Image (spheres, rainbow, N blue to C red):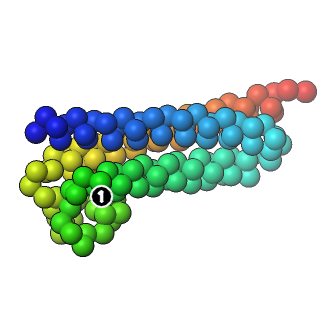
C-alpha cells in the first residue's frame, strides 16, 4: 500500500509541475494577447477566455497521458485495456467501473481522481483570475485618455 501511495504521489507531483509550468505560460501568453487587443472589449474578453479554457484543457489532457503512461509502465490495468480511456475515467472522477485496476494497484485510481480534482479546481481559479484581470485591464484602458 505504501508503494502505491508513493507512486501515486510521484505521478501527481509530475502533473502538478506540468500544471504549474503550463499555467504560468498561459497567463503570460494571455497577458500579451490581452494587451495587444486593447480597444476590442467584447472580442478581447471572449478570445482570452476561450484561449485560456482550451489551453487548460490541453494541459489536463497531457496530465491524463502521464497517468496513462504510468499505468502502462506499472501494468495497472488488465491486458487489452484502453489505458488512455482508463486514465480519463479516473482523472475526471467519472468512474464508470467498467475497468478496474489489478488488485495490487487499487489505490492508483483514487489517487488519480484526487489529482484530477485538484487540477480542475486550480484551472477554475486560473480562469477566474484571467477573467478578472482582463476586465480590470479593460476598465483601466477605458479610463486612460
Using the image, determine if residue 92 lies above or below residue 115.
below
Query: Is residue 144 toward the left or the right of residue 121 in the image?
Result: right
Q: Residue at x 63, y 51 (%)?
A: 51
The residue sitting at 18% across, 66% down in the picture is 78
Q: Please name the residue that numbered disc 1 is placed on.
A: 72
**Position of residue 129 measured from the top left corner of the image (x, y, whole percent):** 55, 34
Q: Residue at x 61, y 53 (%)?
A: 50
Point 16% across, 58% down: residue: 101
Q: Residues within 10 Å of mark 1 (few under 14, many from 20)?
A: some
For residue 26, what is the image quadrant?
top right
Q: Is residue 62 left or right of residue 69?
A: right
Q: Position of residue 52 (x, y in %)?
A: 59, 47
Q: Is residue 135 above or below residue 55?
A: above
Q: Is residue 53 visible?
A: no
Q: Position of residue 133 (x, y in %)?
A: 64, 32
Please state which of residues 77 and 89 is positioned toward the viewer in this rendering: 77
Nearest the eye: 73 or 84: 73
Amino acid at each position: 500500500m505504501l508503494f502505491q501511495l508513493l507512486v501515486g504521489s510521484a505521478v501527481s507531483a509530475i502533473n502538478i509541475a506540468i500544471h504549474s509550468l503550463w499555467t504560468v505560460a498561459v497567463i503570460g501568453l494571455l497577458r500579451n494577447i490581452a494587451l495587444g487587443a486593447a480597444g476590442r472589449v467584447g472580442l478581447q474578453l471572449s478570445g482570452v477566455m476561450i484561449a485560456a479554457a482550451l489551453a487548460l484543457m490541453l494541459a489536463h489532457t497531457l496530465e491524463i497521458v502521464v497517468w496513462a503512461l504510468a499505468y502502462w509502465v506499472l501494468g495497472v490495468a488488465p491486458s487489452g485495456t484502453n489505458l488512455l480511456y482508463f486514465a480519463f475515467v479516473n482523472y475526471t472522477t467519472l468512474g464508470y467501473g467498467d475497468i478496474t485496476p489489478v488488485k495490487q494497484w487499487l489505490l492508483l485510481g483514487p489517487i488519480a481522481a484526487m489529482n484530477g480534482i485538484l487540477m480542475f479546481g486550480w484551472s477554475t481559479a486560473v480562469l477566474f483570475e484571467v477573467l478578472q484581470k482582463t476586465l480590470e485591464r479593460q476598465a483601466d484602458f477605458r479610463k486612460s485618455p
